[in-house]
Amino acid sequence: QVQLVDAGGGLVQAGGSLRLACVASGRTFSDYDVGWFRQVPGQERTFVAAIRRTGGRTYYEDSVKGRFSISRDKLNNSAVYLQMNSLKPVDTAVYYCTAGRPILSSLRTTGGYIYWGQGTQVTVSS
């Protein structure tokens, strides 16, 4: 079992930055790929970014490429971060971290993951 706690959300003006953190307890992230998804009320949860457990390859949703960066804490492998720069109002959502072992075709789907954090609200004002 892995428990995930995600944090770091808040209110920021357009163009600003936030850094989200996902901290694992119970087990480290060494055995899992880690992703970030986001959800707007009334809409489905959608893929934002992911990082593989081996090799550290990263994947991004097209609208966040060049603005967001996902990374692992290589020292203890119990934290994953999502650095969000040049934020836009359309980035406003609840952000969830997740862990699992998705195959490539499932990497960008919620069904590819097992464990989920409780979510952290990101609000970008115009």
Image (cartoon, rainbow, N blue to C red):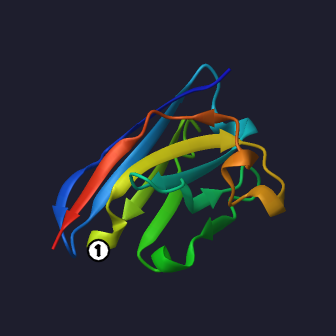
Q: Residue at x 39, y 61 (%)?
A: 83
Which quadrant does the N terminus fall into? top right
Q: Is 72 drawn above or below residue 28 in the view shown? A: below
Which quadrant does the C terminus fall into? bottom left
Give the tally of numbered discs.
1
Q: Is 16 situated left or right of 8 in this image? A: left
Residue 61 figure quarter: bottom right
Q: Nearer the viewer, residue 9 or 21?
A: 9
Q: Residue at x 70, y 35 (%)?
A: 114
Q: Residue at x 21, y 69 (%)?
A: 16
State the SS at label 1: loop
Q: Nearer the viewer, residue 89 or 107?
A: 89
Q: Nearer the viewer, residue 125 or 40?
A: 40
Q: Is 43 situated left or right of 112 in this image? A: left
The spot of residue 56 in percent (x, y) is 68, 59
Q: Is 31 situated left or right of 3 in this image? A: right
The disc labelled 1 sits on which kind of residue?
Answer: Lys
What residue sits right under mark 1 in the picture? 88
Crowding at mark 1 (Cα within 10 Å: few <14, some 14-19, many 20+): some
